[in-house]
Image: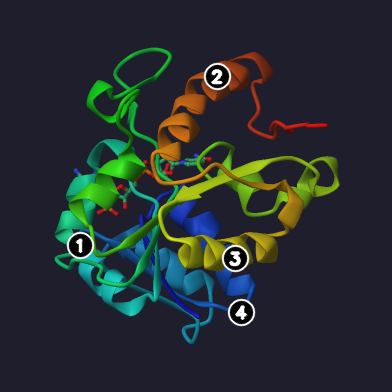
Amino acid sequence: MKIGILGTGEVGNLLGSRLIENGHQVMMGGREANNQKGLDFVNKHSSENASYGTFAAASGFGEIIFNATNGRFALDALELANTDFAGKIIIDVANPFDFTTKPPTLIPELANTNSLGESIQHNFPNAKVVKTLNTLGMALAVNPKQLNNGDHSIFISGNDESAKTRTKTLLTEFGWKIENIIDIGDITGARAMEGFLILSVRLLMSFGLPMFNIKVLKS
Ligand SMILES: NC(=O)c1ccc[n+]([C@@H]2O[C@H](COP(=O)([O-])OP(=O)(O)OC[C@H]3O[C@@H](n4cnc5c(N)ncnc54)[C@H](OP(=O)(O)O)[C@@H]3O)[C@@H](O)[C@H]2O)c1
C-alpha cells in the first residue's frame, strides 16, 4: 500500500521504517522539499520503497496518511498539505503537548472538551481520522513484541468503522494482537487517549525509559 507520513522526526522515521519492513511504499513529508532528515530517510531505504516530498506531495502519494508532526503545529502542517484529504484515512499519532511547561502539559484549547484528533476531523470533514499509537513510546508502538511478548494494550478511536478496520490491519502487521487493540469509539475518544499522556509523562519521569505500557484487564 502507498502510505504518506507527515513528519520528519523520530516518530516519522520509526513508522516509515517499520511500514517499509512490512512491504509498504512510504513517502515522508515535511515543510520543505529538501529537508535533510527526509533525504536521510530515503538514503536509508531502497528508492523503490522510500521517497520524500513536501507535506502536499506525501499527502497526494498516500492512500493512508500518518500525522506524525509536532502536535502544537499539526493543524498548520495539515493545512500546508493543501488538500481536503477527501476519502483518505488520516492516522493521527500526534500529541498536543505544550513543552514550555515542565513537565509538559496539554494545550488547553486541544484538551478536556476537545482534542487534536477531533480538531483534525473537524477541519478536514472529508477525511476519515483515526487516532491511535499516541499513548506509548513509538519504538515500542511499532514493535510491541519487545515488551511482555506483545501482550499489552493499544487504543483506537474514530468515526469511520472501515477506516478503523484498515488501521487495525496495519497495527497487527506491527505485531499487535487483535484482542489488545481496544476500540474506544468515535473520534471524541481522542480526548481520553491524549489525556492519558499526562500520566504517561509522569511514568516516563519515574522509569527514565520509554519501554513501558499498560495492559487493560477485564473480567
Ligand atoms: N516520541 C514518541 O515516542 C512519540 C510517541 C507517540 C506519539 N508521539 C507524537 O508524534 C509526533 C511526532 O513526534 P517527533 O518527535 O517525531 O517529531 P516532532 O519534532 O514533534 O515533529 C516534527 C515534525 O513537525 C513539523 N513541524 C514542526 N513545526 C512546524 C510548524 N510550525 N508548522 C508545520 N509543521 C511543523 C516538522 O516539519 P519539518 O519536517 O518541515 O521540520 C516535522 O515534520 C508528536 O506529536 C509526538 O507527540 C511521539
Question: In the orientation shown, which residue stands out farthest toward the front?
Answer: 219
Using the numbered discs, state the Cα–Cα distance from disc 4 to disc 2 in whole angstroms. Answer: 34 Å
Nearest the eye: 63 or 37 = 63
- Identify the residue under disc 3: 170
Using the numbered discs, state the Cα–Cα distance from disc 4 to disc 1 in whole angstroms. Answer: 27 Å
Q: Secondary structure at mark 4?
A: loop
Using the numbered discs, state the Cα–Cα distance from disc 1 to disc 2 in whole angstroms. Answer: 35 Å
- Identify the residue under disc 4: 23
Amino acid type of the residue that numbered disc 4 sits on in the rendered structure: Gly
Q: Secondary structure at mark 2?
A: helix
- Identify the residue under disc 1: 32
- Left or right of 80: which side holds 70? right
User: Which is nearer the N-term, disc 3 or disc 2?
Assistant: 3
Say if 17 sits above or below 100 in the image.
Answer: below
User: Which is nearer the N-term, disc 4 or disc 1?
Assistant: 4
Tag shown at residue 199? 2
Q: Position of residue 21 (x, y in %)?
A: 63, 72
User: Which is nearer the N-term, disc 1 or disc 2?
Assistant: 1
Amino acid type of the residue that numbered disc 3 sits on in the rendered structure: Leu
